[in-house]
Amino acid sequence: MPDLLTVILPVFVLIFAGFVAARVRLISADGAKGLNDFVLYFCIPPLLFRTMQTVSLDAGSTLRVWGVYYSAVAIIWVIVALGARRVPGLGAVGGAGTAFAATFGNLGMIGLAIAYLAFGDEGLVTAALIIAIHSANHWFFCTLWAEFALRGKGVAPLAVGASVVMTLLKNPIVLALLAGAAWNASGLTMPAVGERLIALAGDAAIPAGLFALGLAVAAYPMRGNLAGIGTLIGLKMVVFPLTAWALAEFVFSLPARETGLVALFAALPTGMNAYFFSIKFDAGVAAVTGAIALGILLSAVSIPLVLWLAGV
């Protein structure tokens, strides 16, 4: 496996470069949004399509990876349900916003980059498996959670599910995963010009995505609800990965590589979707925004630690 410094340093240099570019106003807020949209719609989808169109998926392995990761998610949600109201600013809508932020990691940018640099195409496969249902799982269950907290028994799960499905079907990452899997199953061969186009766009995903993430971090304040921020950081970057690792090691008996990857993905800082959810339901916005920004800074220490423990 590559040297740990070779994996980590380029990632955080690119994030830091984006952060500085935003702070010195070299790139405006509109420019940052444009770059983020470029990465989301034109770079990450080809990367994931390329991964899914060539991979040979094993149903048993897929279910075990999902079982580990999303069982750990469920455990953290139980902890949140029992304790969120005890922390100021985290108990809104029954703690649904806290549950989302404590388990939704930045897989699309940091996760893909680290997985690829540390584990190659095999890392991207595991990342793609988790990403495939990541947004759907969180938006569906946490929306139900919030709606039940707000309206009680007057919630229609099917209507919520239909709304989430329609949203996801417009998501370029979800569409790319589905299209790649369908192409894989078809047995068709991609024309050379198509392969070249996909490679050009996909190869830009990691560097452009990391730079865009740095631009975004500069816009998120780290002040406000300090108790809430600390609680979210502790749940997301300590309790969640330890839970995932324990399940992978002692319950599901995943191979060493998959165990390390699942623990790594669980240890990633909170992703941007948690912010959108908190805004939608006005649930812990100050704590969530602070946790996103501070989590990315702390991940410069936590990610190397996880990779070292995983033997990278």
Image (cartoon, rainbow, N blue to C red):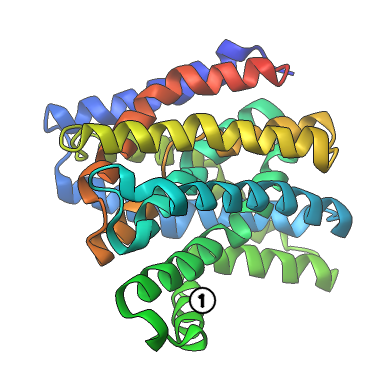
Task: Please tell me which residue is depicted at 82% across the width and 70% down the height of the picture.
Answer: 185
11 above or below 175? above
Q: Badge 1: few (under 14), some or many (20 or more) residues near its Cα, within 10 Å?
A: few
190 above or below 186? above
x and y, in percent, of residue 145 in the image: 43, 68
Task: Please tell me which residue is depicted at 85% across the width and 38% down the height of the picture.
Answer: 253
x and y, in percent, of residue 147 in the image: 36, 75
Circle 1 residue: 169
Task: Please tell me which residue is depicted at 63% across the width and 46% down the height of the picture.
Answer: 72
Given residues 274 and 124, the one toward you in this image is 274
Side of 257 relative to 69 (left or right): right
What amino acid is at disc 1?
Leu
x and y, in percent, of residue 30 in the image: 17, 51
250 above or below 289? above
Split into 4 quadrants, where in the image is the C terminus? Answer: top right
Given residues 76 and 195, the one toward you in this image is 76
SS label for mark 1:
loop
Q: Is residue 203 visible?
A: yes
How many numbered discs sit on the rendered protein? 1
x and y, in percent, of residue 303 in the image: 53, 23
Q: Is residue 204 visible?
A: no
Given residues 94 and 109, the one toward you in this image is 94
Split into 4 quadrants, where in the image is the N terminus? Answer: top right
Task: Please tell me which residue is depicted at 20% across the width and 45% down the height of the picture.
Answer: 286
